[in-house]
Image (cartoon, rainbow, N blue to C red):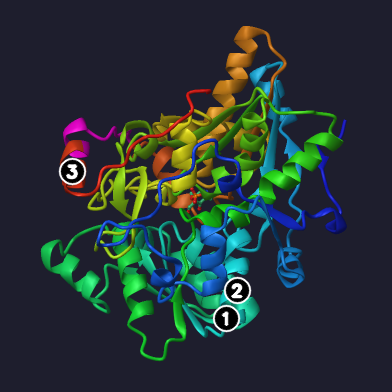
Amino acid sequence: METKILLNESEMPRQWYNLAADLPTPMLPPLGPDGKPVSPDMLAPVFPMNLIEQEVSTDRWIDIPDEILGLLRRWRPSPLKRAVNLEKYLDTPAKIYFKDESVSPPGSHKPNTSVAQAWYNKQFGIERLTTETGAGQWGSALAFACKLVGLECKVFMVRISFDQKPFRKHMMSVWGANCVASPSTETNAGRTVLEKMPDTPGSLGIAISEAIEQAVTDKTGKTRYALGSVLNHVMLHQTIIGLEAKKQLEIAGVDKPDVVIGCAGGGSNFAGLSFPFVNDKIAGADIEVIAVEPESCPTLTRGPFAYDFGDTACTTPLMAMYTLGHAFVPPPIHAGGLRYHGMAPLVCQAVVEGLINPRAYHQLKCYESAITFASTEGMICAPETSHAVACAIDEALKAKEEGKEKVILFNYSGHGLMDLTGYDAYMSGKLSDYSLPQDKIEEFTAPLQDLPPAEQHKTGKW
Ligand SMILES: Cc1ncc(COP(=O)(O)O)c(C=O)c1O
C-alpha cells in the first residue's frame, strides 16, 4: 500500500475553483460607509484591479497563469499522505489522509496565494506590498513571494507573536522584507491604539488597519495591500489544495472522503481543501465538512452572523460574516493564526447554508493531539494545524465506535518547527484552557447593532 500519493508536475490543476459560482444562496455583498454595496473601483486604492476582478467573479473556473504555475512548482504538487501509523495507534477502521501543505519553503499553505497575489500586483505595475501577520506564517509567505517576483514587502506583525516567535521575523529578513511589531508608531491606527492600550498584545484587526493605512497613504500610488486570508480571491487561490487532493484520492482508489477537516482562522486553508468537496456536496455527495476553531476565539461557533469591519480601525468594507466584533482582542493562545475576529464570507455563507459544520476545541486537547501525531507519524505540526489533527483523531475514534471504515481527509496546513516555544509551554504545564466568556462576546459584538443587519438566507437543504 502506498502511503504517499504524489502527482507529477504536469498533473497540477490549471484552474482554480470558485465556490461563489455554486453557492445555493449567494453571499450578501460587501457594503461601503454609506451602507450601499461597494463597487470594484472603491477597492482600487487597496488592491490591484486584476485581483479585484477575481474578488468579485462568479465564474466557476479561473485559469492559473503559466507564470504562477511556474512559481507554485517550487513545491507543488504537495503530497497526500495516509497516516497509517496514527490509524494503527488509534486502532481505528478509518483511513486518515492528510494533504501536506507544510512542504512549501515558508512551511505552510500561505504561499499558494502569496505567489499569486505578488505576481498579479507586479503585473499591475505595483512595486511594494504591505501586510499584517499573526503567527508570522503569512508574513513569511508574502516575504518569500515578493522576493521571487521582485517586490518590496512591509509586514506588521501582531506584537504577541513578534515577541514569541522571533524566528519567523528572521525568515522575513532572509527574504528581504521589513517586519515591525503592531501596534507600531508608524501609523495613525497604531498610535491611536497604543495611546489607549500601551501594553496590548496586538491583534490581526489592528495590524490590518496599519498595513492598509500605509498602502493607501503612499503618494506614489505604487503600494498595495495583500491579505493572507478571508477574501474571496484568497480562498480561490487555495483551492489548488483540494483539487490536487481529489486527484490523489482517486489514485488511492477512494471515490469520496466521508469527512473533510481544516482548521479555520480566516478560513483559507480550510476553504482551500474543502471547497472542491463542498461543490460535490452541493451536487448530492454525502460528505461531512468540518471547520475547527479555538474555544478562545470561537467565531463560527459562537459569534453572530452580522455585517462587520475586517479591521479594528473600521477602514475595510463591511462584510457579512460570523464575527466576534472588530474590536475583539483575543487572549494570547499559541495558535496565533486562529485569532482573527471574523471569517471568510464564502465560508460563512456555506456555514449559514449548513454545508459546513463548525466546531471549537481547547488548546490543551490540540497540543495533546499534536504530540500523538508527532509520536506516530513523526511530524511536528503548527499549533493551528493541531486543531485539524485533534478533530481527525476524534472522527477516527468515532468511526471506531461506529465500526465504520470512514475516509477522513484533513489539511496539514503547516509545520510547527518555528513554534516550538508553544510546545515547550505545553509540555512544561504552563498552558491552560480558556473559553471566551459569553459576556465578553456580548461586549465586543454590541456595537454591531449600529451597523446594517445581515439576514441569513439559505435553501434549508442541508
Ligand atoms: C499553519 C497555519 N494554519 C492555519 C492558519 C489559519 O489561517 P487560515 O484560516 O487563513 O488558513 C494559519 C494562519 O496563520 C497558519 O499559519
Residue displayed at 44% across by 82% down: 223
Q: Is mark 2 within 8 Å of ligand 1?
A: no
**Residue 82: x, y in percent?**
74, 34
Q: Mark 1 and mark 3 in contact? Answer it, CB < 8 Å.
A: no
Q: What residue is pinned by disc 2?
A: 120
**Residue 255: x, y in percent?**
79, 28
Q: Which residues are magenta?
A: 432-441
Q: What residue is pinned by disc 3?
A: 449
Residue displayed at 41% across by 34% down: 457
The three-letter code of the residue at mark 2 reads: Tyr
Horizontal placement of 379 versus 224: left or right? right
- Is 438 one of the magenta-colored residues? yes
Q: Is residue 289 above or below residue 153?
A: above
Q: Mark 2 and mark 3 in contact? Answer it, CB < 8 Å.
A: no
Q: Which mark sits nearer the N-terminus, 1 or 3?
A: 1
The three-letter code of the residue at mark 1 reads: Phe
Disc ID at residue 124: 1
The three-letter code of the residue at mark 3 reads: Gln
Residue 133: quarter of image: bottom left
